[in-house]
Amino acid sequence: MTAIPMPEPITTPWTLPRRGPVGMLLFIVAETSIFGVFVTTYLFYIGRSLTGPTPAEVLHFPVAMTVSLLSSSLTIHQANRALRRGATARFLGFWLATILLGAGFLLGTAREWHELIFEHHLTLRTNLFGSTYYALVGLHASHVVAGMLLLLIVATFGIAGRVRPEHVGRTDVISMYWHFVDVVWIVVVTVVYVIGR
């Protein structure tokens, strides 16, 4: 009886994960905990304001802002997909579209705040609703602004012709952050404009 030779086990060399995505993932985990505190605080103080205005009196569901920001997740995904395929002009078009959609969101936020402050006299000091609303929505808006700065830096390099397919790992990291900002907005919209009203 002859022995049947066993095939050699297939070994795949293990490499360390890229630092950029790992670092961004850890940052997102930390930021998620911060947002968790702000969301919990907002939920805890719903309906506890002793004076008006109340959320039901002054808040309207931000349809245009939500569509704008969530659409930007699609455009940044398409931008990275195009860059991965070497279509740098297409990448830049989708990247600039992401910036325009983000700017539309921030413009909508500014208009909402202007109305709340000057027409409804809702400020940080008005009541608990004002304090928690501006803290939570403002925290999110600050993250959108930070993301916009990153997008604008990459766009500047892209316009100069200095973004190439080998840079897709870096744009992927920015994309991770932008998707995080969009997911947080879904939570904020649900808490502030649906549950909180």
Image (spheres, helix red, strand yellow):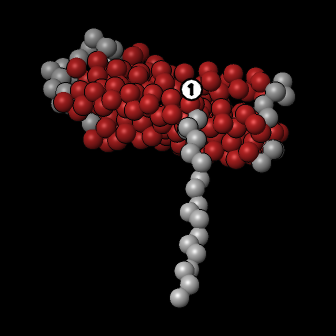
47 relative position to 32: left or right? left
In the picture as drawn, the residue positioned furthest to the top comes out as 125
- Residue type at mark 1? Gly
Does 131 appear above or below 36?
A: above
Q: Nearer the viewer, residue 116 or 3?
A: 3
- Expressed as whole percent of the image width and height from the top left, the position of residue 88 reads 81, 39
**Residue at numbered disc 1:** 147
- Residue 132 appears in the picture as rendered: yes
Write the residue at 23% across / 26% down. 41
Write the residue at 39% across / 16% down. 117
Does 82 appear above or below 116?
A: below
Write the residue at 58% across / 41% down. 15
107 relative position to 47: left or right? right
Residue 184 falls in image quadrant: top left
12 relative position to 117: left or right? right
Secondary structure under the numbered disc 1 in the rendered image: helix
Crowding at mark 1 (Cα within 10 Å: few <14, some 14-19, many 20+) = some
Q: Nearer the viewer, residue 88 or 106?
A: 88
- Expressed as whole percent of the image width and height from the top left, the position of residue 22 reads 51, 34
Q: Nearer the viewer, residue 125 or 4?
A: 4
